[in-house]
Image (spheres, rainbow, N blue to C red):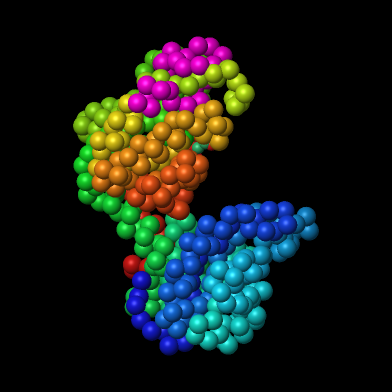
C-alpha cells in the first residue's frame, strides 16, 4: 500500500462490509469490518479523507413487492454506528452512492474524516460493471484503494471498472488485499515441496478447475467430503446412498489418471463415518469407503483416513485446504475436518506454510478454535477459489493495469 501523506486528499476505498445482520439489523459477525480497519487507519494516519464504499447483500435480487429496493433491509446505514465505535470517530453517511448527498458530503470531507456511501448494489450499474457508474464514482476522489478481496473475482463497477479512471500511482491494493495476494502466491507460485492440498466439500463439479490446477503443482492431494464418493463410484466401489455425481464419473477417472502422469499422489479416504440418515441423530458406524452398505451414506472421513491424511499433512512443507472433509455443521460428522485443522496446526509448528483457503473450511478451522494456529486463513471465499484455480481476478488486474 502506498506510503504517502495524502494532505487531506480524498481516497475512495472499496471495502467488504457485507456482514450478516439479524432481524433487528444488528451485526452478528463483524469480522469483515474489523479486517478492513488496518487499511482505513493507515489512510487516516496519512491525513486522507476516506470515502468508503461496499455492497451489502443482494438488494436487486430481493426487491419489495412493488419493485422497489428494500432500503430498510439493505442500507449500509446499519454499519455506521459500529464502524464509528471501532474507528473511535464519527463516520458520516451518504444516503446515495453517486447522487447529491454523496457528492456534497464527499466535497466537504477533510483529512482524518470518514464518509460511508450507500450500498453499491443499489445502483444497477454496479453488478453490470458499468463504465459510467465507475466514472461517476472515480470523480469523488483523487485516489482509489481496493481492499475487498472477497469480491475481486467480480468485474463490478466499484471493484474493478473504477480503477481505470485512476493513474497507476493513484491506485493500490489495501493491506488486507495485499495480505491475501501475498499468502495465496506462496501456494500458487513455487510452493516449497512437499506441497499437499486438501480438497473437500460437497461436489466434484465445484472443484474440477481447482483440482486440475493443483495437479501440476502438488505432491499430494487429499480428497475428502461428499466429492470423494464420486471417485469411489468411478473406481467401481459400493457407496450406498452417499452423495454422487453420476455424470462426473469419467471426469473423476481422468483426474486420477492425470495425477499419475504428473506424479501427484491422490489420497482418497480409505474409510468413512457412515450414517443411516442425513442427520446428527442418525445411527453411525465406520466402513471402508468403497463398501458402504445400501441405505447408509458417508458423511465424514473415517478414523483410518484421518490417520493417513494427518501423517501426509504433518510431513509437508506447504499445505492448502479448501472444503470440509464431512458434514461438519453436524457435530457427529465434524471429526475429520477438526483433525485436518489439528494436523495443519502441527505442520505449522514444524515450520510449514499452511493456508486455509475457502469459505466452509474457514468455518471448520474456526470451529476447531485453530484459526490462529495455521499460517493464514483467507477471507476470500469464491475469490480465493478462483485465484487458486489460476484465473486472473478482475479486481487484481484493474489495479495492476
Ligand atoms: P463446499 O461449499 O463445496 O466447500 O461444500 C461444503 C459443504 O459440503 C458443507 O455444507 C458440507 O456439509 C458438505 N459436505 C461435506 N461432506 C459431505 C458429505 N460426505 N455428504 C454430503 N455433504 C457433504
Q: Residue at x 63, y 58 (%)?
A: 27
* Residue 28 found in image quarter: bottom right
Q: Give the number of callouts.
A: 0
Horizontally, residue 6 falls left or right of residue 70, namely left
Q: Residue at x 48, y 65 (%)?
A: 36
Say if the magenta span includes residue 297: yes
Instruction: Give the percent coordinates (x, y) of residue 288.
Output: 41, 15
Q: Residue at x 57, y 32 (%)?
A: 330
The answer to whether residue 191 is seen in the rendering is: yes
Horizontally, residue 87 falls left or right of residue 68, namely left
**Closer-to-camera residue (227/289):** 289
Q: Residue at x 44, y 59 (%)?
A: 149
**Closer-to-camera residue (68/115):** 115
Instruction: Give the percent coordinates (x, y) of residue 334.
Output: 50, 32
The answer to whether residue 388 is seen in the rendering is: no
**Closer-to-camera residue (279/171):** 279
Looking at the image, is 299 positioned above or below residue 62? above
The quadrant of the rendering that contains the N terminus is bottom left
Say if the magenta span includes residue 151: no
Looking at the image, is 288 positioned above or below residue 57? above
The segment highlighted magenta reads 285-307
Looking at the image, is 180 positioned above or below residue 385? below
**Closer-to-camera residue (323/371):** 371
Instruction: Give the percent coordinates (x, y) of residue 282.
Output: 60, 21
Horizontally, residue 26 falls left or right of residue 246, namely right
Residue lying at the far right of the rendered structure: 66
Instruction: Give the percent coordinates (x, y) of residue 217.
Output: 25, 42
The quadrant of the rendering that contains the C terminus is bottom left
Amino acid at each position: 500500500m502506498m506510503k504517502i501523506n495524502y494532505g487531506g486528499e480524498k481516497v475512495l476505498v472499496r471495502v467488504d462490509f457485507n456482514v450478516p445482520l439479524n432481524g433487528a439489523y444488528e451485526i452478528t459477525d463483524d469480522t469483515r469490518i474489523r479486517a478492513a480497519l488496518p487499511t482505513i487507519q493507515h489512510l487516516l494516519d496519512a491525513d486522507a479523507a476516506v470515502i468508503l464504499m461496499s455492497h451489502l447483500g443482494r438488494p436487486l435480487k430481493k426487491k419489495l413487492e412493488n419493485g422497489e429496493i428494500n432500503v430498510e433491509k439493505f442500507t449500509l446505514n446499519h454499519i455506521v454506528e459500529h464502524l464509528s465505535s471501532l474507528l473511535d470517530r464519527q463516520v458520516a453517511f451518504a444516503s446515495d452512492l453517486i447522487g447529491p448527498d454523496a457528492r456534497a458530503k464527499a466535497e466537504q470531507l477533510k483529512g482524518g474524516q470518514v464518509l460511508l456511501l450507500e450500498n453499491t448494489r443499489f445502483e444497477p450499474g454496479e453488478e453490470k460493471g458499468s463504465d459510467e457508474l465507475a466514472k461517476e464514482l472515480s470523480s469523488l476522489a483523487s485516489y482509489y484503494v481496493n481492499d475487498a478481496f472477497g469480491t475481486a473475482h467480480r468485474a463490478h463497477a466499484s471493484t474493478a471498472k473504477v480503477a481505470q479512471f485512476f493513474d497507476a500511482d493513484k491506485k493500490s491494493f489495501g493491506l488486507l488485499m495485499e495480505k491475501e495476494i501475498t499468502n495465496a502466491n506462496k501456494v500458487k507460485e513455487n510452493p516449497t515441496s512437499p506441497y499437499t492440498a486438501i480438497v473437500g466439500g460437497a461436489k466434484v463439479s465445484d472443484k474440477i478447475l481447482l483440482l486440475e490446477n493443483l495437479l501440476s503443482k502438488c505432491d499430494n492431494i487429499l480428497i475428502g467430503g461428499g466429492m470423494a464418493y464420486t471417485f469411489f463410484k468411478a473406481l467401481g466401489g459400493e457407496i450406498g446412498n452417499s452423495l454422487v455425481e453420476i455424470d462426473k464419473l469419467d471426469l473423476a477417472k481422468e483426474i486420477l489418471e492425470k495425477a499419475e502422469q504428473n506424479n501427484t499422489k491422490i489420497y482418497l479416504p480409505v474409510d468413512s463415518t457412515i450414517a443411516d440418515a442425513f442427520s446428527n441423530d442418525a445411527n453411525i458406524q465406520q466402513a471402508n469407503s468403497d463398501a458402504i452398505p445400501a441405505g447408509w451414506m458417508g458423511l465424514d472421513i473415517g478414523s483410518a483416513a484421518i490417520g493417513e491424511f494427518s501423517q501426509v499433512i504433518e510431513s509437508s512443507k506447504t499445505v492448502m485446504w479448501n472444503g470440509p472433509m464431512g458434514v461438519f455443521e453436524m457435530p457427529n460428522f465434524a471429526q475429520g475436518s477438526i483433525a485436518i485443522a489439528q494436523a495443519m496446526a502441527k505442520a505449522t509448528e514444524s515450520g510449514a506454510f499452511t493456508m486455509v483457503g475457502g469459505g466452509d473450511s474457514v468455518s471448520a478451522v474456526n470451529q476447531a478454535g485453530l484459526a490462529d494456529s495455521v499460517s493464514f486463513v483467507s477471507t476470500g471465499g469464491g475469490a480465493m477459489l478462483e485465484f487458486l484455480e489460476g484465473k486472473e481476478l478482475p479486481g487484481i488486474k484493474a489495479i495492476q493495469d
